[in-house]
Image (cartoon, helix red, strand yellow):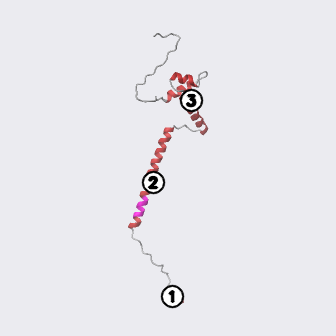
Amino acid sequence: MSKSSDEPFRRVEVITSVQRRRRWSVTEKVRLVEEAMQPGMSVSYVARQAGISPSQLFAWKRRMLEGGHAAVQADEDVVGASQVRELEKRVRDLERMLGKKTMEAEILKEALDLARPKKRTSPLLSWSNPEDDTQ
């Protein structure tokens, strides 16, 4: 089987691991999106060259554009979803710990109330004797 020089070289990828999905680094994603945004380039062509689905490249492009737009609109840095999830988990853990400490404090207060003897309340004694009012 001979290969003609007019035919473009076809890329063959051999997957040797058990993983079903390839992991793309951030720099690779950015490079592909930037390449797709070059004048005269199409997303489908760049995706075909990289061996990924065009919809995946469109999704990366949309996320980059939305993230940049949101950052400019809010005048803030863009925070990754994984970082947000991590911080939300930390807040949940801290709230759970606060709830435990609050319950412990309430239980201790109730225990102190039960342990203290109740003071007997006596009727109020007046400072003046009612019999002395006849002066």
Amino acid carrying label 1: it is Asp
User: Dot 2 corresponds to which residue?
Assistant: 99
Residue sticking out furthest to the front? 1
Q: Quadrant where the N terminus lies?
A: top left
From the image, state whether disc 2 or disc 3 is nearer to you: 3
Amino acid carrying label 3: it is Phe
Residue nearest the observer in this picture, 126 or 58: 58
* Rendered residue at 45%/50% (across/down): 96
User: Dot 3 corresponds to which residue?
Assistant: 58
Residue nearest the observer in this picture, 15 or 72: 15
Q: Which residues are magenta?
A: 105-111
How crowded pointer 2 is (Cα within 10 Å; few <14, some 14-19, many 20+) is rated as few
Tag 2 secondary structure? helix
Q: Which of the 4 image quadrants contains residue 63?
A: top right
Q: Quadrant where the C terminus lies?
A: bottom right
Magenta span: chief secondary structure: helix
How crowded pointer 3 is (Cα within 10 Å; few <14, some 14-19, many 20+) is rated as some
Q: Position of residue 99 (x, y in %)?
A: 45, 54
* Rendered residue at 46%/44% (across/down): 89
Between the C-alphas of marks 1 and 3, the distance is 99 Å
Residue nearest the observer in this picture, 40 or 51: 51
Q: How many marks?
A: 3
User: Dot 1 corresponds to which residue?
Assistant: 132
Badge 2 or badge 3: first in the primary sequence: 3
Amino acid carrying label 2: it is Gly
